[in-house]
Image (tube, rainbow, N blue to C red):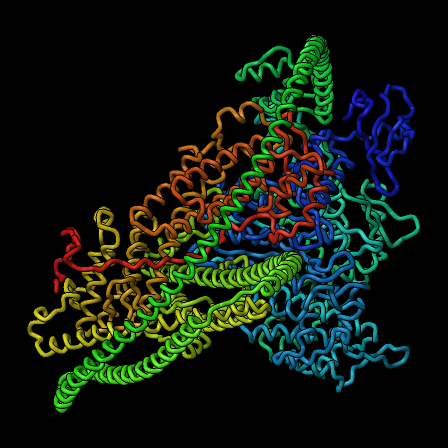
């Protein structure tokens, strides 16, 4: 209880509010005892006076800020109504957390939407973890129950309670799903699948829409999930309680009947449903009373399909399903019977014989319609030993009809439950322990409460009593364990209320007694209640204004019940005649439903008929069991079961006055409140120091108590300690401030003193510098005057000198130019003579050369004619040579082509010679005529002497002047044109720049389009590869199951079934070692989504039909062409069916994979076409770019032409090799006695393996080889030996044996992988050999000869299918390699990367403060023995894998892919655990995690593995560690967080911020305002992250194996050790 000393200024309190219920306020002044009012400041800024008179009292105190949003309500200092509501509000609205602990109770708030917090990655994160370390979740509670059951071998119960619509059914569903995953056995999964399949069936027949809930359970159920000795699920059993049968015939407004009726009406158009004669639900009286037949967002037709699939999984055959649907449809038609009144006063009634509803009901139920119509309107009585038939009124007939409908539905419900239990019952052994899940109705109170609410509230009273006793028992056990001096706690019990209901002469006894009275009525029963209990029982009251009602004071509320209808509902009777008609039904199921139950049966409501059968003679004793009696008995059995188990609670929190103490360990208390201690304390004396200091802090010894390891406080004392701690810190802050301020003032004085000295020094320096400047200025003036005078005189001298030099230069230039013109004339004459002489000599040379060439052509033509005559003579004998060797035709054709080509060349040479001669003659004539003209002009010029007159000289001068003027004008125009040219060039440059930029942008756009299209195609290819490899892994698992079944069929019965062993941490992940895969498996089936193609598990079942009956399975086997003879030797029917089912599944998957591969090729072609069209659309429109594109196309055509020529040359070489190979083979076939004497040099060094030695070869080389011997061999030796054997068989034309060797080798590799499934080195060895064999067969494939410059002789046999099978084996070996590493890393990932303290002293410097207590009554587990998990262990495991891969010389690309997968596993597991653990979200832990990741990063970088995808895989964890270390206060910090954490999703960032918990006083909590700022910034971020909180730990990246052409293989080059014992191989 809060003490008055805590009501000080600044304290937060809660005050009532008519709208908000409670609002927070702050005290504006201290409270002193005797004050009548408190001055409060509300959250909206208003100041109010709050009265504290005795009727009202002091308002509840608010909890410290450090406890806001706690995940355990018991950690609050003040546990009252406003504190609980506020904490739940903060967690639900601000932290997006719907789960909160309240001690041992898990409080679940219904979000009314699907949240992504129930995936398999969440199950993996919670599996094997401690409940106190993880964030509250329904999976955490289920894990705690499972671990307690395994550890203590004691039965457990999970009790889920709450009001209608609070999510009880969904919580039960997720609990069962968790058990189905973590308790799934490796040998079979049908039991887990059946357990999950029971949910949609029970929801369909037992759930309905109410005003408060669209899927309200109208019955209670308790499901016992049985587990074997190894923790695997082996069976289940269901018990039901108090089905609300009245809903079948009546629904309140805006409510519906049970879902199954609406599902049938919605599916009425199905072919198999047309015989039910159903209409819309609005047309039936039993489904239209609520006036609302639809539920938003629910497809009733699809829900019926889910129900039918679930029935099929549970073994209900299709014909039996139709029988069920016929009975349900008959109930609807029964409600539409038209009962008409007749007689005087309507005391009689009748039904027309042609009533459509009656006819359909009779047909569906297989009964006589006339008899049913008669006995629904009449009853049989026995009076005085005589049998009388009495007609009934219309109201009585309607009641009889409704009673029959309720009885039919109740019997059908009980039959379905019994059938579910039969299907879920354990077959091979009895369960050792079980976990029960109780999903029962919550406390109900309405405006009108009747018999159903009475029974429901009675059950809740019993559960509340069990809850109270268990909670106080656990609390007292905690006190005993800590050896506290305490008195036994007395708590308020609800036993008086339970005694009032079930005690002697209680309400139920009086109700049964009144039911046995012949003329009992509700009024008489009410009168007896008043007489017996009014003023006698404190929990019983009578209403003031009613004599037919009573009031009960329940633990939760006061409820008034109306007595009207109690007796009829308790009797639940029906007349015997309609029941007898049903027993005589032609339908076997209907007759079975209404058979007499044996005496002494179970008292469970699901197995005993509710009520009795009323007839004319006295009924048996067992038929007089009332509903209240049965419910009381079954409820007692339930309570006995719950009391014998360890309960776990999921419910809504209710206000109570129980005060639970708060406890701290001594280390935690010292870490938080050590500042209040005087003096220093050693770590080993913490307990003594705490025991000495606490009495000084809290004077009242009743408020605390010391235990062995913990100290206990009563409610409110933590707030007192927080106040003292805040005051001590405030005084320490004041002292620190005084010292800091003194230091600041002294530093300021010293600064001023240094500044004054500096100013003085600078002033004196300025004066001295001014004097020096004056002296320098005077001296500079004198120097300037002297220099100026000298410059003037020197300029005059230089001008005179320059003029003289210019005159001399012009005179000398005129003389030199005159001499130069004379030299030019002489040189021109000499050059003209030289060219003429040269031309004459060249003509003479050309004539001589033409004559020589003609002579050579004649001689060569004569020799060619001789050669042609010789070849024609030889051609006559070609036919005989062609018969001997047809390959010479190619050479003859080549020679003929060469001769034709030479003839064409000679003709072209002759034409060229003729043309050349004509051109030479014409050119010679032209030169001769030109020479004559030149000689004639020279002679004329020599005879005419020039005569220059004065007039001509004057004209020449004037012409020169005009020419000068013209030159000047042209010069100006040229200058203008030059300027215009410059401007045009500038404009041209601008245009060129703009055009270049446009072309660049277009090219960039086109390149980006190509990149995006290529990325899309690559992503689709990766997705197809991932789906294929995922389905390959799933198929491996199926074959492993078949092998397990086959092996167990050969074991003794005692050792046949072995459960799976469950390991700690997240070991529920599927890590089964891969097993051999069938060669027919070629691709993935067409699932609805990638997730289903990746992994099929019990948590995400698709529409799977059971093949339990023999005819459908045989038909499937015949349709798919699967032989039946191989399974005939199986022992037992189940094994034979399982074997056939696996084989049928294999064939079906093969067909789907082939179809998927064809579709994939078509889609790829379509995408390539779209890519080409996109490139065509993005082509540039400019002319220059088009020219470039045309040039590029021409070059591409030229390249294609060169490639074709190169290919033809290769084909020519290959043809020669094949011809020589064929000739060699022919010679070998002609001489079979000595094949080795005619081997080609290229085919020597082969190994011959006889047919009978193949099995010995596989055993000695692969399956039975010792690990030491195999690891000592050269990498790939086994594959090379196998290839030499295959090559020899192919060379001998034995194609069948060559294919058989490949198939046998693949099977041997699979067998070796299966035998050595846990050996890392051996798995890497077989991976290497498989890859080598696949590559070498690909290299020598006849259809695709791959190689560089070396000559490769291809195989004759086609081994494409065998190469594909070897590729599948490579994938299998790779997956097994990763599975081994993952199984070793899984247990140590979280301890090593999150919990290990690699940085010494980091966490020791700050003591961890735990604000919440652990689960009450949970015993601390001892630390696991063995080596502590650390980063060294993680790096050691990674090093083992790296060493194994490097030893086998596997390609670096494969190593990068493997370590990318492991890096994703490390990051995902660590990040998921970090997101769910509040104690890990702190600054020092973020620094520790970042350091651990840096060690891993350094290790990867040192081995060149960092750039292969491992960096991107570790990036989310790195950013999460950085987020823990970043500042989280202002909006700038929020922007930095959003920019930095781009690899984290929005949900992950917000989750880390909400989970952030300061571990020291130096840190601060993240405020809600800052979280809202970050959320607003994240809304605008388009990061493309999926909306999920946790990473998928099971995500598998597809693997690609790079092709490495192997070197040539020869037997002489291989070193075969004798330890292999393969000397039977013969070298050829």
* The image quarter in which residue 761 lies: top right
* Residue 429 coordinates in the image, percent (x, y): 44, 55
* Residue 1617 coordinates in the image, percent (x, y): 15, 51
Query: Which image quadrant: the C terminus?
Result: bottom left
Residue 848 in sight here:
yes
- Which residue is found at the position 60% from the left and 78% from the top? 587
Q: How many marks?
A: 0
Q: Nearer the viewer, residue 1188 or 379?
A: 1188
Q: Nearer the viewer, residue 1120 or 1091?
A: 1091
In this rendering, would 1628 be left or right of 467? left
Query: Which image quadrant: the N terminus?
Result: top right
Q: Nearer the viewer, residue 331 or 143?
A: 143
In the rendered image, the vertical position of residue 320 relative to residue 71, given as above or below: below
In this rendering, would 1159 be left or right of 274? left
Residue 201 in sight here:
no
> Which residue is farthest bottom?
876
In this rendering, would 1198 be left or right of 709? left
* Residue 1113 coordinates in the image, percent (x, y): 44, 74
- Which residue is found at the position 59% from the left and 34% from the top? 800
In this rendering, would 142 be left or right of 1320? right
- Which residue is found at the position 39% from the left and 71% from the top? 1200
Q: Nearer the viewer, residue 1617 or 1530?
A: 1530
């Amino acid at each position: 209880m809060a003490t008055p000393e805590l009501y000080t200024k600044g304290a937060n309190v809660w005050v009532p509010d008519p709208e908000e219920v409670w609002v927070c306020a702050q005290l504006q002044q201290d409270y002193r005892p005797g004050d009548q009012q408190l001055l409060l400041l509300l959250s909206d800024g208003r100041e109010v006076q709050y009265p504290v008179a005795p009727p009202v009292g002091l308002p509840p105190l608010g909890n410290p800020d450090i406890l806001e949003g706690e995940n355990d309500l018991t950690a609050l200092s003040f546990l009252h109504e406003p504190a609980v509501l506020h904490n739940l509000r903060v967690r639900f609205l601000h932290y997006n957390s719907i789960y909160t602990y309240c001690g041992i109770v898990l409080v679940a708030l219904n979000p009314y939407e699907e949240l992504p917090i129930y995936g398999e990655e969440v199950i993996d994160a919670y599996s094997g973890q401690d409940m106190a370390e993880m964030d509250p979740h329904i999976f955490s509670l289920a894990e705690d129950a499972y671990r307690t059951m395994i550890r203590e071998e004691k039965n457990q119960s999970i009790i889920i309670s709450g009001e209608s619509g609070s999510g009880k059914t969904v919580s039960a569903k997720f609990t069962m799903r968790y058990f189905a995953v973590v308790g799934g056995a490796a040998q079979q999964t049908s039991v887990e699948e059946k357990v999950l399949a029971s949910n949609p069936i029970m929801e369909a027949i037992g759930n309905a829409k109410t005003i408060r809930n669209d899927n309200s359970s109208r019955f209670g159920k308790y499901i016992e999930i049985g587990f074997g000795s190894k923790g695997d699920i082996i069976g289940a059993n269901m018990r039901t309680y108090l089905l609300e049968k009245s809903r079948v015939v009546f629904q309140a407004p805006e409510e519906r009947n049970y879902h199954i009726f609406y599902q049938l009406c919605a599916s009425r158009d199905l072919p198999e449903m047309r015989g039910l004669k159903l209409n819309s639900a609005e047309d039936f009286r039993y489904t239209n009373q609520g006036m609302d037949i639809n539920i938003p967002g629910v497809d009733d037709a699809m829900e019926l399909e889910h129900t039918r699939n679930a029935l099929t999984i549970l073994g209900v055959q299709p014909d039996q399903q139709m029988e069920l649907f016929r009975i349900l449809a008959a109930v609807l038609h029964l409600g539409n019977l038209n009962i008409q009144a007749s007689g005087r006063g309507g005391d009689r009634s009748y039904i027309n014989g042609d009533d459509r509803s009656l006819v359909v009901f009779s047909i569906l139920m297989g009964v006589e319609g006339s008899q049913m119509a008669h006995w629904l309107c009449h009853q049989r009585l026995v009076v005085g030993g005589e049998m009388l038939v009495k007609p009934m009124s219309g109201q009585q007939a309607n009641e009889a009809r409704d009673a029959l409908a309720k009885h039919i539905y109740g019997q059908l419900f009980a039959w379905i439950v019994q059938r579910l239990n039969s299907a879920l019952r354990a077959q091979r052994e009895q369960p050792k322990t079980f976990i029960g899940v109780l999903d029962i109705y919550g406390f109900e109170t309405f405006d009108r409460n009747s018999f159903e609410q009475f029974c429901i509230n009675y059950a809740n009273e019993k559960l509340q009593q069990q809850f109270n006793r268990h909670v106080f028992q656990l609390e007292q056990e905690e006190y005993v364990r800590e050896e506290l001096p305490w008195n036994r706690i007395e708590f308020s019990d609800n036993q008086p209320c339970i005694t009032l209901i079930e005690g002697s002469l209680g309400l139920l006894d009086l109700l049964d007694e009144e039911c046995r009275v012949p003329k009992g009525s509700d009024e008489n029963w009410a009168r007896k209640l008043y007489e017996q209990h009014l003023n006698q029982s404190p929990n019983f009251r009578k209403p003031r204004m009613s004599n037919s009602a009573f009031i009960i004071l329940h633990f939760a509320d006061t409820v008034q019940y109306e007595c009207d209808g109690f007796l009829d509902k308790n009797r639940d009777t029906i007349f015997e005649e309609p029941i007898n008609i049903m027993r005589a039904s032609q339908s076997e199921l209907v007759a079975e439903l209404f058979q007499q139950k044996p005496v002494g049966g179970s008292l469970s409501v699901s197995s005993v008929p509710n009520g009795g059968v009323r007839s004319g003679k006295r009924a048996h004793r067992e038929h007089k069991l009332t509903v209240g009696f049965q419910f009381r008995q079954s409820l007692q059995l339930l309570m006995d079961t719950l009391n014998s188990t360890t309960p776990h609670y999921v419910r809504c929190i209710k206000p109570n006055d129980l005060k639970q103490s708060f406890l701290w360990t001594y280390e935690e208390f010292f870490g938080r409140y050590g500042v209040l201690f005087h003096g220093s304390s050693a770590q080993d004396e913490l307990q003594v120091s705490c025991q000495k200091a606490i009495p000084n802090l809290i004077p009242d010894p009743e408020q605390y108590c010391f235990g062995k390891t913990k100290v206990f406080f009563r409610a409110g004392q933590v707030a007192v300690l927080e106040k003292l701690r805040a005051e001590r810190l405030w005084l320490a802050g004041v002292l620190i401030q005084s010292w800091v301020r003194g230091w600041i003032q002294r530093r300021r004085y010293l600064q001023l003193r240094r500044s004054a000295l500096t100013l003085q020094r600078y002033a004196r320096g300025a004066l001295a510098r001014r004097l020096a400047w004056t002296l320098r200025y005077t001296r500079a003036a004198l120097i300037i005057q002297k220099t100026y005078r000298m410059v003037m005189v020197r300029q005059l001298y230089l001008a005179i000198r320059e003029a003289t030099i210019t005159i001399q230069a012009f005179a000398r230039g005129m003389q030199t130019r005159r001499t130069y013109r004379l030299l030019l004339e002489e040189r021109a004459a000499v050059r003209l003579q030289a060219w003429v002489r040269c031309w004459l000599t060249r003509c003479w040379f050309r004539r001589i050369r033409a004559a020589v060439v003609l002579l050579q052509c004649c001689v060569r033509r004569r020799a060619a004619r001789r050669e042609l005559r010789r070849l024609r003579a030889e051609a006559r004998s070609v036919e005989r040579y062609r018969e001997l060797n047809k390959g010479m035709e190619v050479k003859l054709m080549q020679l003929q082509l060469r001769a034709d080509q030479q003839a064409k060349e000679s003709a072209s040479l002759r034409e060229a010679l003729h043309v050349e001669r004509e051109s030479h003659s014409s050119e010679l004539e032209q030169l001769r005529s030109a020479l004559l003209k030149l000689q004639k002009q020279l002679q004329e010029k020599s005879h005419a002497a020039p005569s220059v007159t004065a007039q001509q000289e004057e004209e020449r001068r004037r012409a020169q002047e005009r020419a000068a003027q013209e030159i000047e004008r042209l010069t100006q125009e040229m200058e203008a044109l030059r300027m215009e040219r410059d401007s045009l060039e500038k404009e041209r440059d601008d245009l060129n720049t703009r055009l270049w930029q446009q072309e660049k942008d277009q090219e960039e756009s086109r390149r980006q389009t190509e990149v995006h299209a290529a990325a899309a195609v690559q992503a689709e290819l990766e997705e197809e590869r991932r789906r294929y490899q995922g389905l390959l892994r799933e198929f491996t698992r199926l074959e492993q199951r078949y092998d397990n079944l086959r092996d167990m069929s050969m074991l003794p019965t005692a050792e046949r079934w072995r459960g799976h062993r469950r390991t700690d941490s997240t070991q529920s992940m599927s890590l089964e070692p891969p097993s051999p895969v069938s060669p027919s498996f070629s691709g993935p089936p067409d699932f609805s989504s990638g997730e289903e193609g990746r992994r099929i598990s019990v948590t995400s079942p698709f529409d799977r039909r059971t093949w339990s009956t023999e005819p459908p399975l045989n038909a499937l086997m015949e349709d798919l062409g699967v032989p039946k003879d191989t399974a005939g030797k199986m022992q037992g029917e189940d094994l034979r069916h399982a074997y056939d089912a696996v084989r049928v599944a294999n064939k079906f998957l093969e067909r789907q994979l082939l179809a998927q591969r064809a579709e994939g090729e078509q889609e790829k072609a379509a995408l390539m076409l779209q890519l080409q069209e996109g490139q065509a659309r993005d082509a540039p429109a400019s002319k220059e770019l088009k020219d470039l594109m045309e040039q590029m196309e021409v070059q591409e055509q030229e390249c294609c032409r060169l490639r074709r020529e190169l290919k033809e040359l290769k084909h020519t070489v290959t043809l020669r090799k094949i011809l020589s190979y064929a000739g060699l083979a022919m010679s070998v076939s002609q001489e079979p006695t000595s094949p080795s004497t005619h081997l080609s040099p290229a085919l020597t060094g082969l190994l011959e393996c006889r047919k009978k030695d193949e099995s010995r070869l596989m055993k000695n080389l692969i399956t039975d080889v010792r690990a030491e011997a195999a690891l000592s061999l050269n990498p790939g030796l086994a594959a090379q030996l196998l290839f030499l054997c295959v090559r020899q068989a192919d060379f001998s034309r034995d194609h069948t044996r060559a294919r058989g060797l490949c198939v046998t080798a693949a099977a041997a590799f699979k067998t070796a992988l299966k035998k050595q499934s846990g050996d890392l080195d051996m798995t890497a060895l077989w991976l290497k050999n498989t890859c080598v064999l696949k590559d070498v067969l690909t290299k020598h494939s006849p259809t695709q000869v791959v190689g560089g410059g070396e000559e490769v002789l291809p195989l004759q046999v086609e081994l494409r299918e065998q190469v594909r099978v070897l590729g599948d084996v490579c994938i299998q070996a790779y997956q097994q390699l990763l599975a081994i590493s993952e199984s070793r890393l899984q247990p140590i990932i979280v301890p090593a990367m999150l919990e290990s303290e690699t940085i010494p002293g980091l966490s020791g410097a700050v003591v961890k403060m735990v604000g919440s207590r652990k689960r009450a009554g949970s015993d601390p587990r001892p630390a696991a023995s063995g080596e502590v998990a650390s980063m060294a262990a993680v790096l050691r495991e990674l090093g083992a894998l790296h060493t194994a891969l490097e030893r086998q010389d596997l390609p670096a690309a494969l190593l990068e892919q493997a370590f990318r997968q492991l890096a994703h596993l490390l990051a995902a597991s660590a990040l998921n655990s970090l997101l769910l653990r509040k104690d890990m979200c702190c600054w020092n832990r973020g620094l520790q995690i970042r350091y651990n990741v840096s060690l891993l990063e350094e290790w990867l970088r040192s081995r060149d593995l960092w750039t292969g995808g491992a960096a991107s895989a570790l990036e989310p964890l790195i950013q999460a560690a950085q987020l823990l270390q970043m500042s989280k206060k202002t909006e700038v910090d929020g922007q930095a967080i959003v920019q930095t954490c781009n690899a984290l999703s929005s949900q992950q960032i917000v989750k880390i911020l909400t989970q952030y918990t300061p571990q020291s006083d130096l840190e601060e909590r993240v405020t809600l305002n800052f979280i809202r700022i970050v959320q607003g910034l994240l809304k605008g971020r388009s990061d493309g992250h999926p909306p999920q909180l946790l990473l998928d730990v099971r995500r598998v990246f597809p693997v690609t194996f790079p092709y490495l052409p192997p070197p040539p293989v020869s037997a002489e080059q291989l070193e075969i050790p004798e330890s292999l014992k393969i000397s039977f191989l013969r070298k050829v």
